[in-house]
């Protein structure tokens, strides 16, 4: 345990330092310059699902998602060379990996200090899953409210402007029809008036439907997404859904479709794929989205970027995980696993 100093540079009693370390509500790791974990508090073991003391002596990279570990080693080495206290993860989409392979979104604060063996880093890790869930729900509520306001505005404009203008045009035509000659002209005018009345009736029905209309069902949204990406891909992905998805929560559906959209976009932008297979498999307690392409495959050092980070983030938001692996015969398989909470 690294000695702690008070504001006057005096060593704090070791037993007090230890008590604060172990009682910290965030995960706290003490990491050597070579990346080995020298100490970890109880919350670290609880957060990452390791048995007590199991993290001590392990490389810190076991807590980094597999696809980012190689890059993390370089970043860690660079930090040791220029060690300064700094927060990490605010808006960066950082992820940490648990013992079971699942990922959680985190914020991290790094504080360098020294012991007899040189520079060590105190890493404080906070699980922000609940905070992100609250933000996601707030965004969804705001989106739904905006949709309702737009429907209300459209209905009001149709009623107050379009219908009134059509009605006024019909009244003018009626006045003209009363004096129109020959009779065939008056008949054509009256036919136009009848058509205007039908149009007004149709608009009123549309206004009524706007107030009753619900968001499209998840299966419809899935079909629309496949149609949209098919135009960009130049071919239609094959899709298999083992069970109905319309009863899943709106939050899970939003993340499922966003993940599928990102995976298909990757196949368009990066993979050079000529075929993509999509499977949505519902199990007793979970959901698996599997996207397989025949493209160029994953790079040796996939640094991710926002797209891959967002996929990991969405899985972690539901307590799940996402893994990429080579496909048989070339290409990539993405498997996105999340539990289903009834």
Image (spheres, rainbow, N blue to C red):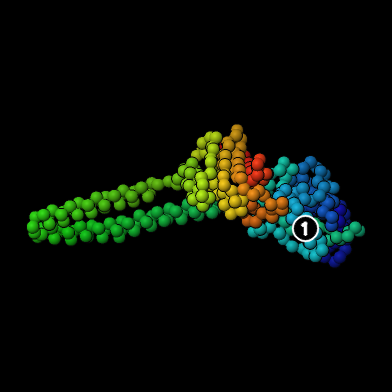
Q: Position of residue 178 (x, y in %)?
A: 10, 58
Residue occupying image coordinates x 75% and y 55%: 72
In depth, the one of 168 and 9 nearer the eye is: 168
In depth, the one of 298 and 127 nearer the eye is: 298
Quarter-of-image position of residue 99: top right
Q: Which residue is mark 1?
A: 74
Q: Position of residue 336 (x, y in %)?
A: 62, 43
Residue 198 is left or right of residue 103, and the answer is left
- Report the residue that reaches farthest toward the bottom: 8
Q: Position of residue 340 (x, y in %)?
A: 59, 39
Q: Position of residue 168 (x, y in %)?
A: 22, 60
Quarter-of-image position of residue 329: top right
Q: Is residue 295 above or below residue 11?
A: above
Q: Is residue 310 visible?
A: no
In depth, the one of 278 and 99 nearer the eye is: 278
Residue 221 is left or right of residue 292, and the answer is left
Residue 182 is left or right of residue 107, and the answer is left
Residue occupying image coordinates x 51% and y 36%: 244
Placement of the C terminus among the 4 image quadrants: top right
Residue 47 is left or right of residue 162, and the answer is right
- Report the residue that reaches farthest toward the left: 182
- Report the residue that reaches farthest toward the top: 284
Residue occupying image coordinates x 46% and y 53%: 145
Number of marks present in the image shown: 1
In depth, the one of 166 and 48 nearer the eye is: 166
Q: Is residue 298 visible?
A: yes
Q: Secondary structure at mark 1?
A: helix
């Amino acid at each position: 345990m690294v000695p702690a100093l008070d504001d006057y540079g005096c060593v704090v009693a070791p037993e007090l330092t230890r008590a604060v370390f172990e009682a910290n509500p965030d995960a706290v790791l003490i990491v050597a310059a070579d990346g080995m974990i020298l100490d970890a508090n109880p919350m670290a073991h609880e957060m990452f699902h390791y048995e007590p003391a199991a993290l001590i002596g392990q490389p810190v990279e076991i807590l980094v998602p597999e696809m980012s570990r190689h890059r993390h080693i370089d970043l860690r080495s660079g930090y040791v060379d220029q060690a300064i206290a700094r927060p990490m993860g605010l808006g960066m989409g950082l992820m940490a990996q648990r013992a079971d392979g699942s990922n959680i979104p985190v914020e991290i604060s790094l504080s360098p200090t020294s012991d007899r063996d040189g520079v060590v880093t105190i890493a404080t890790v906070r699980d922000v899953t609940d905070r992100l869930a609250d933000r996601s729900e707030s965004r969804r509520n705001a989106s739904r409210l905006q949709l309702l306001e737009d429907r209300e505005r459209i209905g009001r404009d149709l009623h107050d402007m379009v219908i009134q203008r059509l009605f006024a045009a019909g009244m003018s035509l009626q006045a003209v029809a009363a004096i129109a000659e020959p009779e065939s002209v008056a008949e054509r005018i009256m036919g136009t008036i009848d058509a205007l009345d039908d149009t007004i009736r149709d608009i009123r029905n549309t206004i009524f439907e706007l107030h009753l209309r619900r968001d499209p069902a998840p299966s419809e949204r899935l079909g629309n997404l496949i149609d949209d990406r098919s135009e960009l891909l130049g071919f239609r992905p094959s899709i298999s859904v083992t069970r109905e998805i319309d009863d899943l929560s709106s939050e899970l559906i939003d993340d499922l479709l966003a993940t599928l959209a990102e995976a298909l976009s990757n196949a368009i932008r990066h993979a050079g794929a000529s075929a993509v297979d999509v499977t949505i498999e519902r199990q007793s307690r979970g959901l698996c989205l599997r996207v397989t392409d025949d493209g160029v495959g994953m790079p040796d050092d996939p640094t991710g970027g926002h797209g891959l980070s967002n996929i990991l983030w969405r899985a972690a938001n539901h307590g799940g995980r996402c893994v990429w692996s080579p496909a048989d015969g070339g290409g990539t398989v993405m498997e996105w696993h999340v539990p289903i909470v009834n």
